[in-house]
Amino acid sequence: MTDKTTGFTNAIARFIVNTEDREIPQKVREHAKVAFMDWIGVTMGGKEDPLVKKLIHYADLMGGNEQATILGHGLKKSVSQAALINGGASHALDYDDTLTLFLGHPSVTLFPSLLALAEWKEKSGPDFLTAYIIGLKAGATIGACAGIEHYMSGWHATSTLGHFASAAACARVMGLNEQQTTYALGIAGTQACGLKRVFGTMCKPFHAGRSSQAGLMAALLAQDDFTSVEDILEGTHGFFQVLKGQVNDKVVETLGKTWDIENLAQKYHASCHATHSPIEAVSSILEKEGLSTDEIVSIEIHSSQLALDAAGNMAPKTGLEGKFSIPYCVANGILRGNTGMQAFTDEKVNDPEVASFMEKILVSLDSGIEALEANVTVKTAGGREFSGFSDILKQIPDLEIKRSKIKRKFRDLCGPVLGEAKTEDLMESILSLEEVGSIGSLVDKATK
């Protein structure tokens, strides 16, 4: 049970500070390395997004010390600016990982601040991994208590929970004490924000970078004994009361016992995760039944309110909007087969052939469907009807398969930026992160 004297926020802080490296199983570390490889890949893939150029321009206007690297650009900015820019780049493609308990995308809020800080302070690979794992667990624990009501109320949980996760990871790698870490959570929590209303604009990836940056700022201020409340999560007018949620003692008891990282779902389509189950369900039917696109009369997709809120754009006009459109993503997947970065350009989204096929796709709400599940029905000109189901968040491959898939994705995203030889060298360094004495040496390999 949570200690009612010290409270939930303090329990999180104790976990962050007192967890010993040896308590974290090696398999958990292997999952973390795969997550880091995936994050580096999607950051490299997103480095030329217009959002990133604007953030770099903003950093140029602000000035500051050259402390940490902007991945793929050969630039150094302040540690705070690096967290913001790399965070924005890593979520620009919406190709990054998802965790159900986190109610969104954890790694894009954790790795940007952690990498910038670790490079600046010359932290080791093992320390870096430990901080990420602890930050992920802290964020997932808070997310499990916030619950789906938090997300459905309009909050972009990647951002709101990301503030806490980033602060937790940074506090750990900096070696803050319990009091300072509690303050760091409080400083992060009072900044927590981010609205789903901005999905489909530059503000969604901005949320990732901003939450990472804010968590870093929180830890740096707390190191200087900048004060906050000690019950930011559970207190009156605190996070749970205002932004929804409540302390769940059963969830708190998992701290230090389970790690949640094995449930991290990486993406294999470069679009909102709410589009993945429909893509997979429809594709499976077509493959199993040997159906051609010419035979299809209609496709009915039944989704949850959560999925429709996130990816219910029925008439996308830009490549970015296409990432949040179930009809476009399904039509594109069927007609082109390529659901990677190249599928989400303005030209591809406005292709008349795709637009015509989208008219055959009906997406509707089914109150019996949860989270990112999808029920689909495909009808043909011959009067045949086929049904299918997918829940991408529960169809997570084992570690070895996941590692293999992410290696391919990493090569696809990093190869065009770094070249084949440097891409392979960087990948090997990530997979042997325990042997890296200084994160800065790894970052150097991610520079053109």
Image (spheres, helix red, strand yellow):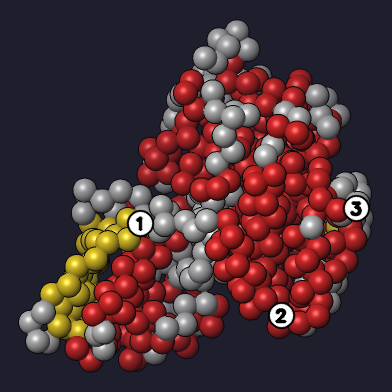
C-alpha gap between disc 3 and disc 1: 40 Å
Q: Position of residue 235 (x, y in %)?
A: 54, 19
* Amino acid type indicated by mark 3: Ser
Name the residue: 83% across, 37% down: 174
Q: What residue is at 17 percent from the left and 72 percent from the top?
A: 386
Measure the alpha-carbon separation of dots 2 and 3: 24 Å
Looking at the image, residue 242 lies above or below residue 341? above
Give above or below for 424 relative to 22: below
* Amino acid type shown at disc 1: Asp
Q: Quadrant of residue 284?
A: bottom left
For label 1, the residue is 391
Within 10 Å of the Cα at label 3, are there few (<14), some (14-19), or many (20+) other Cα atoms? many
- Mark 3 touches mark 1? (CB < 8 Å): no
Mark 3 or mark 2, which is nearer the start of the sequence?
A: 2
Is the C-beta separation of discs 2 and 3 under 8 Å?
no
135 sits to left or right of 158? right
Residue 36: image quadrant is bottom right
Q: Position of residue 324 (x, y in %)?
A: 42, 67
Q: Is residue 126 above or below residue 230?
A: below
- Residue 45 x, y percent position in the rendering: 65, 73
Left or right: 212, with 194 as reference point: right
Mark 1, Cα crowd under 10 Å, few <14 / some 14-19 / many 20+, is some
Mark toward the start of the polypeptide (3 vs 1)? 1
Q: The residue tagged with tag 3: helix, strand or loop?
A: loop
**Residue placed under numbered mark 2 in the picture:** 415
Disc 1, SS? strand
Q: Which mark is residue 81?
A: none
Which residue has dot 3 on it?
438
